[in-house]
Amino acid sequence: MNIALLACQKFPKLTPADQLLIPELAKYNIESKAVIWDDPSVDWTSFDYLIFRNTWDYYEKENAFNLWLDKLENLGVKTLNALDIIRGNKHKFYLRTLEKRDIQILPTIFIEKTNQLDLAKMLPESWEKAVIKPAFSAGSHLTEVFEAAAVASINQKYQPIAAQKDLLLQRFMPEIQTLGETSLVFFNKQFSHAVNKKPADGDFRIQVQFGGKYTAINPDVALIAQAKRIVETFPNPLLYARVDGIVIDNQLQLMEIECIEPDLYFNLSDGSQQRFVRAILELIH
């Protein structure tokens, strides 16, 4: 068995935590290695499976990424997660579909690509602050928090972006700065571990590169059940999913569910790499 663990040019050898999957897989006679997803010299048919891990520049290369996914499908290459899941998850309008299935998401307005962006007309009067970001993005790329009073200048700034990309307009939840964001990680639809992420003082971005602080937590069974209900909306097989949201009064308000290349916080949960590898074995056998 030969597996490619998909990486990108910024992390050609994977993150240190993901590198540890290679010796773990070797215990089961599975040969694996880091492979850059947009390396034109790679023969993708030489692998039994491709596993998406650190393809962290895909949103910067939208057209190339989409063409590459089509190429994999035409070649009949097996991927985890599956290509249909990857395609559906890379554009955050999937949140609208989940909302229609009675999943509680953050208050969100979905803005389709337009040459006549009018945020002032869209912004509910009750929203004092809002967040705007592209629907095809990651890592807080082109994401901005703004006061309702600044809507005219934000509209001007995002008009050229709106002409090129679908956008999300979300109510800013001040709880992100106090309660933080909670991530619940699932392997093969079974709960593995959870992490709370709080931004640096005065910031809203929880990513570690912006000073965010991550802590392992033990969520109660009710919260795990809420996250699992979201995970179960996805078809099988689902090697991994990370459910991200704000927990207010023990109710999970979904921000996103990551099924492409999420950090799975292996370093914060003992045994998580082994659980991940067991999930791979369950799915490929």
Image (cartoon, helix red, strand yellow):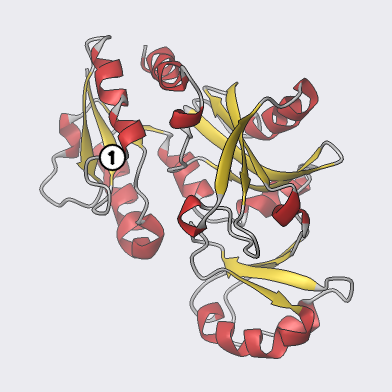
Note whether residue 240 is visible.
Answer: yes
Which quadrant of the view contains residue 117? Answer: bottom right
Q: In which quarter of the image is residue 58?
A: bottom left
How many discs mark residues in the rendered view? 1
Q: Which of 164 and 198 is in front in this view?
A: 198
Q: How crowded is mark 1: few (under 14 residues within 10 Å), some or many (20 or more)?
A: many
| Nearest to the observer: residue 87 or residue 21 | 21
Give residue 204's position: percent from left, percent from top: 64, 61
Q: Which residue shows up at 71% across the image and 56% down it?
A: 177
Quadrant location, the N terminus: top left
* Depicted 259 relative to depicted 156: above or below: above
Q: Name the residue nearer the viewer: 231 or 16.
A: 16
Name above or below for residue 219 compared with residue 67. Answer: above
Q: In this view, does 158 lie to the left or right of 9?
A: right
Residue for point 24% across, 25% down: 48
Residue 160 image point, x, y percent: 51, 85
**What residue lies at 14% left-to-right and 52% top-to-bottom?**
40
- Image location (x, y in percent) of residue 151: 72, 84
Quarter assignment of residue 168: bottom right
Question: Which residue ends up furthest to the left in the rendered image?
Answer: 41
Can you give x and y, in whole percent of width and height, for residue 93 in the image?
A: 62, 57
Residue picked out by circle 1: 14
In this view of the protein, can residue 78 be seen by the observer? no
Give the secondary structure at mark 1: loop
Q: From the viewer's perspective, is 281 left or right of 91?
A: left
Q: What residue type is labelled 1?
A: Leu
The quarter in which the C terminus is drawn is top left
Residue found at x 44% / y 30%:
267
Asked if residue 75 is positioned above or below residue 146 in the image, the reply reads above
